[in-house]
Amino acid sequence: MNLQKTVKSTEFYVALIILLLCMAIQMKSGQFFTGNNLVDVVRAFSVPAMFCIGEMFVIITGGVDVSFPAIASLSMFFVCSELEEVASNPLFFFLVAMLIGLAVGLLNGVIIARFRFPALIVTLGTSSICFGIMQGVFKSREYPLCEPLKELGEMKLFSATNPVSGLTSNMPVAVILMIVLVFLGWFILNRTMLGRGIYAIGGDVKAAQRSGFNVFGILLFIYAFSGCMAGLIGVLRSTMLLAVHPNNLEGMEMTVIAACVLGGVRMTGGKGSVLGALLGMALLTIVDNSLILLGISTIWQKVFTGAIIIIGTAASAMQTKRNERKLAIKMNEGGK
Amino acid sequence: MSAASLLPITSAAIANKYCVEARGGEEVSDYIIKAENIKKYFGGVKALDGVNLEIKKGEIHCLAGENGCGKSTIINIISGFYTLDSGTIEIDGTKYEKMNPKQAIANGIQVIYQDLSLFPNLTVMENLAINMEVAASRKFVSKARMRKIAEAAVAKIGFKIDLDETVENLTVGMRQMIAISRALLNDAKLIIMDEPTTAITKREVKSLFKIIKQLQAQGIAVLFVSHKLDEVFEIAERFTIFRSGKNVASGNTSELDQNKFTYYMTGREIISSHYEYTRENAQNVLEVKNLSLKNGFKDVSFSLKQGEIVGITGLLGSGRTELAETLFGYHAADSGEIFIEGKKVEIRSIKQGIENGIGYLPSDRVTEGLFLSQPIVDNISIEKWHDYANCLGKIDRTQIEKMTEHWAKELSIALHNIEDPVGTLSGGNQQKCVLAKWLALDLKVLILNGPTVGVDIGAKFDIYELVKRLAKHGLTVIIISDDLPEVLTNCNRVMVMQSGRLVETLSTQGLDESRLAELAN
């Protein structure tokens, strides 16, 4: 029974596709399961994966947040350019970035939860405002990373060297934070009543209200959480790149949303798991990072990513349709 | 019949039980709830104008009335969601001038809304337990505790269900059971069910009634909101009828009959007559031979004459809707032939369906039949836009307005302005708009799928009269319906479908309702 359910789930299919893709790449190039390639994949995976957690919270309630790249960029650029002289403790940088993210997230949350405005439009607005402030007020440009953060960025857990090519890749410390955040996301969604509330709102807002959930509070929380995490991740991203690229994250929102949907998070709300979203992101990362190992030109990567998104979402949509048909049959048989 | 005659005895026994307790205790009322002279205004509009509602302990009470009569308003007042403007509510002998939802729940009042207030994306277990867990201000989820609560809830009415199934995979009947057992968790004394039978099949209605009786045996009162007379007779002991925010009648259901009931609800005398089909030698308008659709229906053959009204009945999922949709061109049949007026035709798209003179009124008018936010005039005229557009595609507004006004008058659609969104109309008037849209075309066959679901009695009879008038003028009508009396009085023939097959075609002349019910199930 449980095995059957597992086999039918979106997560299972995505995992299967990842596995097949990895095998194909390995067979063609022999380079996939090498230490440095795996480290590279994890490196590329970590930042978008963290964004996935915040985004999936929002999507499960039936909303969408497209402002996190802007929030991340703004807070990243602000702390790196303005606090360089003021502080030396890297924690302080993170704290300020998180506060900026929290403020914008709260603004999103209040407007969306209080006035029930469409989340897409509101976050599109705050996104534009954040980029505007960054470019206009702080005159954003490529910027060298300040010392305290640079030290943090140069720290590594371990490094892996490819014996054939001699290339070395470092596992960044940020991976630990990713693991913590993923666990936190999983814990909130599955083990707390807050998490049940998030699913409940996505299922039926009115019913959630009648059940006694604090709908306003929960919505406020998820947008604030998404914003706060975006601030943190923004600074983390700059430590990994060892420089501040203000426009580096632009467009990330679409990849993250696509990964969530691919992993079975329902756009209309109510459904989705942390595992699914992460698998979706993993698939997109591997396609993005490793197609070159298959001898496919980088120009075609975008085409592949697009195709995978369409095929993946179509597959889960068809799954839903098949279930509906089954329900009709069940009703029919029940009537006999 | 025997069940009905037993009813008063059981209720009397329960009433006795309470009387004994009343004598023993201090001051206990016979009534679980007594609402007196309740007034409620929304802005300047009177929703309730001094109504009374009294429900005895452990009785099944029916509240009936047309849409907008104040039924939902009184429910929301009793459950504490609306504050009343004047009047008193007495629960179990204690008077309340103001009441909030928490107090109502603490007093054992539970409402099962029409939409059931379930979370389709969560499991049965979570749906059953979540209210209790939120009420207890839990911070963390405990599967074991939730399962315990869920098992206790299911045990209350004793039905079998997989607690780990997701609710969206269940039938509406099952969902209703979940909502009922969830309501019972809070030591309910009065359960209010808001039109619980609108979305479920006959069979599910039966098991629902069984459960309602079971609740009564446990001493729980049920307020049953419905406007279906047969149900009121079957289940309720006493009734209250509202019209336009006022009480019009209340008493024992045994004193009620069809004509009185309709009169109380609508304020007018309505006599329904059986449809007599008189043109036995008319030509065949629609003939279907061995029509099949995969996962829909198989080998369906029949022929309809001009001016006939033919009913199709059968359970949900029997293929009746798929058959109608195939005739209309929404699905393309896998095999079989369709003849219109003796000529073989291809109907593989809706466009072809309409070209061949077939119109279809879908079962869900809100999502399939109307553009709710668009003006009435556009909704009625949409199928005729081609005829009223000039070579640049500009539509002649005065022409379509004239046409709309003509049909609004013809079908007596109650509207203020034809530019109002069609969503502002009542269910019955919306349905008339869908009808008007089709009648504006020169149809040969009109298929009506559940034409009176969620429609007031008054508007229902208007629709019946209209359909009969049209048939007299030569339109052939197919009515797909669960409502057997509707089929029996308005159709001259009825076809019964079962698991995708047409199993029986009968003349309604002298056909007994119970015989038809037997065939259909």
Image: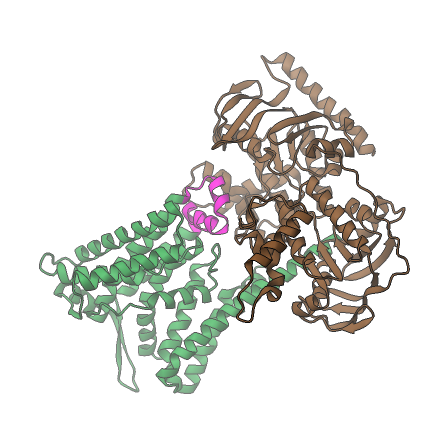
Q: Position of residue B234 (x, y in %)?
A: 76, 35
Q: Residue B372, position in %: x, y?
A: 55, 52
How many circles with numbers are drawn on the protein?
0
Residue A329 placed where, x, y %? Answer: 69, 59
What residue is rendered at 33% in x and 55% in y?
A: A226
**A312 and B492: which one is in front?**
B492
Image position of A129 (left or right of B32): left
**Image quadrant assignment for residue B460:** top right
Q: Residue at horizontal 30%, vertical 55%? A: A227
Name the one closer to the observer, A274 or B111. B111
Seen in the picture, residue B178 relative to B301 is either above or below; the reply is above
Q: Nearer the viewer, residue A75 or B292?
A: B292
Please, is residue A222 above or below residue B17 in the view? below
Residue A6 percent location from the top left of the image: 54, 63
**Quadrant where the N terminus of chain B lies?**
top right
Q: Could one spot residue B27 in this view of the protein?
A: yes
Report the magenta stretch's main SS: helix
Write the start and end of the magenta stretch as one range. Answer: A190-215
Q: Which chain is brown?
A: B
**Residue B74, above or below B37:** below
Can residue A207 be found in the magenta stretch? Answer: yes
Q: Residue at x 71, y 48 (%)?
A: B201
Q: Colour of chain A?
A: green
Q: How is the model colour-coded?
A: by chain
Q: Is residue B2 magenta?
A: no
Can residue B370 be seen here? The reply is: no
**In the image as oriented, which residue stretches furthest toward the left?**
A85
